[in-house]
């Protein structure tokens, strides 16, 4: 029965995603990013140093408990927990498999302009958030969508976004994270994925059914630790393959503009594939423009929206230009270079041998050894996917409360846990396609609101910089 449902849904979902990613997503993401880059006069460049100071000047693995909301650093780590997930390992692998090494270049482009986008998202999240009498903070796109568009149209767009994010992150997103953990643990430890699912449900359930302060205290510890572990392992591999780094970087730029050599087909088809894969996986990786991380930034206790806006930019930078790039360099330098097993392989040929789940494990295994590579990626994915699931659940809660009230939150969390378990036993491809579809749908109402509230964002920036 389950196989029949998957067989029916998969081609339909693929067609929807193909249309959204090729004809809507790229233009919306780049459009919003370029728009805010121009209107803020390259805020991601001018205020980059300020953002770094705001992040690294406030690092605390055990921050002071907040009476309401989170500290700025806790909000950032919650956002990074959402951003640095399977999209950095599994998503980047999928982009390289389908779009070639050049897809990474287009991920960089999306991320650069996305830094301006996320600045706007975080600024608006602070300016439009609602604080209840008991100190509970609710903020995110549904609130700035309602600010941008009044009346029935605003209510419709906000509800559309809320439903999309609940399905995309709260339900399908949990399936993706659990699916990736289950697959890699089965490869590395030979543990049946359904057993991994049960353990995940128990561990996540403790936080899902708690408050924002519990979430903040967990992710502010996990995120720095998981970053150090992944960066250390990646640097070991890259040092061992340092002689291939020039060739690796050259492939990223060469195949960004001439991908037909590795993808096959016409120049137009190959280029469109590389760009769309970079945009789609870039969105899933750094989430700028998707409307997810504003829920975390809305919780920040800051004196001015601009302060969290520049901090939010660093989250995108860390996600894409540091974590994702290191993973991509490991994969390309070990598998696609002149001595690699996939040198000059076309994407179709590669996908019959490797998939996006085990590509990273294979790459790390070239230097660390097959078993050690599988173990390393499995452990990293456990950290990444676990923390991402915690953040995504919180984002969904804000929207469930908006639609149905706070009484519905326990029911939502239980359903999310069920989806997490299901994710460990269903098709990897279907899970990813469903998640991509709802991610893509979230972008539409969020982007419309971002365009409509340009004056509010630019005004806040000018006010702060006076």
Image: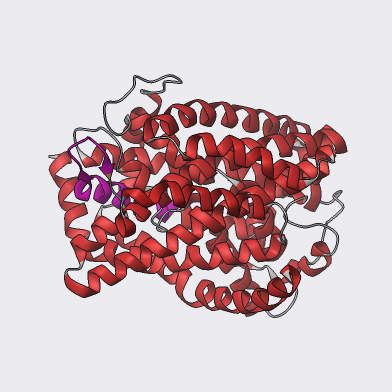
- Towards the viewer: 347 or 49: 347
Choose top left, top right, bottom left or bottom right for residue 172.
bottom right
Classify residue 162 as left or right of residue 302: right
The structure's colour scheme is: secondary structure
* Point 68% across, 58% down: residue: 94
Return the residue nearer the eye: 5 or 217: 5
Q: Is residue 233 left or right of residue 416?
A: right
- List x then y, in percent, for residue 325: 60, 45
Please state the total of marks drawn on the protein image: 0
Residue 230 in the image: state x and y as whole percent. Answer: 64, 33
User: x and y percent of residue 282 in the render?
Assistant: 53, 56
Q: Is residue 93 magenta?
A: no
Residue 317 visible in this rendered orientation of the protein? no
Residue range (magenta): 112-137
Q: What residue is rendered at 26% in x and 38% in y?
A: 136
Residue 104 visible within the image: yes
- When asked about the image quadrant of residue 79, the answer is top left
Answer whether residue 127 is magenta in the image: yes
Q: Residue at x 25, y 56 (%)?
A: 143
349 is higher (above) or lower (below) than 176: below
Q: Can you say which quadrant of the picture contains the N terminus? A: bottom right
Quadrant position of the C terminus in the picture: top left
Point out residue 450 in the picture as x, y percentages from the top left corner: 28, 61
Please tell me which residue lies in front, 120 or 343.
Answer: 120
Q: Is residue 433 above or below residue 208?
A: below
Q: Is the magenta region chiefly helix, strand or loop?
A: helix
Q: Nearer the viewer, residue 351 or 4?
A: 4
- Horizontally, residue 240 falls left or right of residue 15, namely right
Residue drawn 63% across the image and 61% down it? 432
């Amino acid at each position: 029965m389950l196989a029949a449902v998957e067989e029916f849904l998969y081609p339909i979902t693929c067609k929807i995603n193909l249309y959204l990613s090729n004809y809507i997503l790229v233009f919306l993401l780049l459009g919003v990013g370029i728009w805010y880059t121009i209107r803020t006069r390259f805020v991601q460049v001018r205020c980059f140093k300020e953002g770094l100071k705001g992040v690294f000047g406030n690092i605390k693995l055990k921050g002071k408990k907040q009476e309401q909301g989170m500290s700025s650093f806790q909000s950032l780590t919650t956002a990074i927990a959402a951003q640095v997930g399977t999209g950095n390992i599994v998503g980047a692998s999928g982009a390289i498999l389908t779009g070639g090494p050049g897809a990474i270049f287009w991920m960089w482009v999306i991320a650069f302009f996305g830094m301006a986008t996320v600045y706007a998202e975080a600024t608006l999240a602070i300016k439009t958030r609602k604080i209840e009498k008991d100190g509970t903070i609710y903020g995110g796109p549904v609130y700035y969508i309602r600010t941008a568009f009044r009346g029935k149209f605003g209510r419709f767009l906000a509800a559309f976004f809320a439903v999309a994010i609940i399905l995309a992150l709260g339900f399908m997103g949990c399936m993706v994270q659990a699916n990736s953990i289950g697959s890699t643990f089965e490869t590395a430890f030979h543990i049946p994925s359904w057993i991994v699912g049960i353990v995940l449900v128990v561990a996540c359930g403790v936080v899902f059914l708690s408050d924002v302060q519990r979430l903040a205290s967990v992710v502010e510890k996990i995120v720095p630790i998981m970053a150090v572990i992944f960066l250390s392992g990646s640097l070991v591999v890259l040092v061992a393959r340092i002689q291939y780094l020039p060739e690796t970087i050259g492939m990223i730029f060469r195949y960004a503009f001439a991908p037909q050599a590795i993808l096959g087909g016409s120049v137009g088809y190959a280029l469109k594939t590389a760009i769309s894969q970079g945009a789609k996986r870039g969105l899933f990786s750094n989430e700028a423009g998707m409307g997810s991380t504003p829920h975390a930034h809305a919780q920040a206790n800051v004196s001015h929206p601009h302060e969290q806006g520049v901090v939010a930019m660093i989250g995108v930078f860390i996600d894409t230009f540091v974590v994702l790039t290191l993973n991509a360099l490991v994969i390309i330098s070990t598998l696609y270079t002149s001595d690699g097993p996939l040198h000059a392989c076309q994407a179709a040929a590669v996908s019959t041998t490797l998939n996006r789940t085990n590509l990273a494990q294979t790459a790390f295994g070239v230097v660390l050894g097959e078993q050690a590579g599988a173990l390393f990626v499995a452990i990293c994915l456990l950290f990444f996917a676990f923390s991402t699931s915690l953040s995504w659940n919180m984002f969904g809660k804000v929207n469930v409360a908006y639609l149905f009230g706070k009484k519905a939150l326990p029911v939502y969390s239980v359903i999310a846990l069920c989806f997490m378990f299901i994710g460990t036993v269903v098709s990897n491809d279907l899970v990813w396609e469903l998640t991509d579809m709802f991610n893509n749908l979230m972008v539409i109402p969020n982007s419309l609101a971002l365009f409509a509230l340009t004056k509010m964002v630019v005004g806040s920036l000018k006010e702060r910089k006076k």
